């Protein structure tokens, strides 16, 4: 089992980046104070694995979405 082997597919990565961006926007524009800071911190586990294509939790559980076609193979 390789910890840093890519295991995230394109759809998984895109959805996580979108969720991370939404959390950052909520934390900076709409919600102020401690809750806003918490939302920004919660965006980190969504964005960082998406950038590198490696999810440590997927590695531990033996899950991979890398070879799953998101749209019938048109995004390769």
Image (spheres, grey):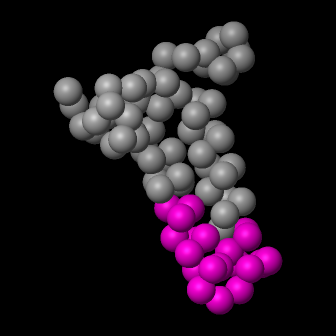
Q: Quadrant of residue 15?
A: top right
Residue, x 56% and y 75% (percent of image)? Answer: 38
Task: Assign the magenta stretch its main secondary structure.
Answer: helix
Left or right of residue 14: residue 58: left
Residue 40 visible in the current orientation: yes
Q: Position of residue 61 (x, y in %)?
A: 32, 31
- Quarter holding the N terminus is top left
Q: Is residue 31 magenta?
A: yes
- Up the image or down, 74 lies above or below 64; here it is above
Residue 23 image position (x, y, % from top left): 66, 63
Q: Quadrant location of the C terminus?
A: top right
Residue 17 in magenta? no
Q: Is residue 15 left or right of residue 58?
A: right
- Whole-percent x and y of residue 57? 36, 41
Front residue of this view, candidates 13 and 42: 42
Mark count = 0
Q: Residue at x 73, y 70 (%)?
A: 26
Residue 6 visible within the image: no
Q: Is residue 40 above or below residue 4?
A: below
Q: Which residues are magenta?
A: 25-44
């Amino acid at each position: 089992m390789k910890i840093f082997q890519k295991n995230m597919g394109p759809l998984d990565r895109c959805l996580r980046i979108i969720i991370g961006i939404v959390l950052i926007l909520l934390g900076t524009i709409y919600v102020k104070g401690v809750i806003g800071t918490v939302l920004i911190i919660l965006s980190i586990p969504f964005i960082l694995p998406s950038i590198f294509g490696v999810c440590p939790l997927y590695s531990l559980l033996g899950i991979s979405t890398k070879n799953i076609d998101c749209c019938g193979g048109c995004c390769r």
